[in-house]
Image (cartoon, grey):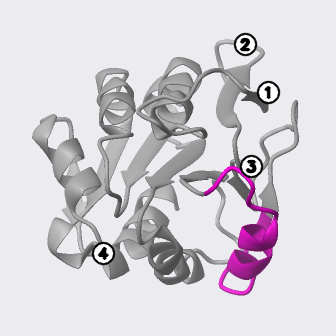
């Protein structure tokens, strides 16, 4: 099975976690990556500029209706939900849309919104990753990705800056792999090669 999209959700401590995870994805990595990092609604694009220093892939904030392409790490813009849309059942043409709908679990962007729309569009071709964070956002979306046949990975709570989010995901019973932070990128490279 060829995976077509990796979605990553993180909150408190996420910048540090992404600085460890992203360097492990090589320039030739074949699967696009979309990230929801909880941040203040007035944040500028400095997060993408900072993360670019740690990534072999192109890091960019998503523009509305932007096509999803390999070789990119897409960041949800501050104060917008990030949704995945597909043109057909094969997910051969997919793009992102942005929404200002109400916050979900006090968050916009919401990890659950990204994960749930990914599950609907990519089903068993999706991989969900939950990293450090201080709330339960992402647990419900991770469950939907697992139910649709996708792969689910969670950071080992003992390696997380804040274990609340990983523990909430693990409590769903829908997790395929619980890995130390430094082992997540090598695992993704292995299953996506």
Residue 182 placement: quadrant: bottom left
Mark 1, Cα crowd under 10 Å, few <14 / some 14-19 / many 20+, is few
Q: Are marks 1 and 4 in contact (CB under 8 Å)?
A: no
Mark 3, Cα crowd under 10 Å, few <14 / some 14-19 / many 20+, is many
Residue receiving disc 1: 93
Marked residue nearer the N-terminal end (4 or 3): 3
Marked residue nearer the N-terminal end (1 or 3): 3
Dot 4: element: loop
Residue 132 placement: quadrant: bottom left
Marked residue nearer the N-terminal end (4 or 2): 2
Q: Which mark is residue 161?
A: 4
Residue receiving disc 2: 88
Mark 4, Cα crowd under 10 Å, few <14 / some 14-19 / many 20+, is some
Q: Which residues are magenta?
A: 40-59
Marked residue nearer the N-terminal end (1 or 2): 2
Image x and y of residue 22, in percent: 57, 75
Marked residue nearer the N-terminal end (1 or 4): 1
Q: Is residue 168 above or below residue 102?
A: below
Disc 4/disc 3 C-alpha distance (Å)? 23 Å
Image x and y of residue 178, in percent: 20, 60
């Amino acid at each position: 099975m060829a995976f077509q999209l990796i979605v990553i959700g993180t909150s408190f401590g996420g910048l540090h976690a992404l600085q460890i995870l992203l360097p492990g994805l090589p320039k030739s990595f074949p699967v696009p990556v979309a990230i929801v990092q909880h941040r203040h609604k007035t944040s500028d694009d400095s997060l993408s500029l900072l993360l670019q220093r740690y990534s072999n892939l192109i890091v960019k904030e998503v523009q509305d209706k932007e096509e999803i392409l390999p070789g990119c790490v897409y960041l949800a813009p501050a104060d917008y939900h990030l949704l995945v849309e597909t043109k057909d059942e094969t997910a051969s043409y997919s793009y992102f849309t942005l929404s200002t709908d109400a916050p979900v679990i006090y968050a916009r962007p919401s990890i659950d919104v990204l994960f749930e729309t990914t599950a609907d569009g990519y089903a068993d071709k999706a991989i969900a990753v939950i990293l450090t964070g201080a709330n339960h956002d992402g647990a419900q979306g991770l469950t939907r990705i697992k139910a649709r046949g996708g792969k689910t990975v969670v950071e080992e709570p003992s390696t997380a800056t804040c274990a609340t989010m990983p523990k909430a995901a693990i409590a769903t019973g829908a997790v395929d792999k619980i890995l130390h932070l430094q082992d997540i990128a090598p695992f993704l490279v292995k299953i996506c090669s």
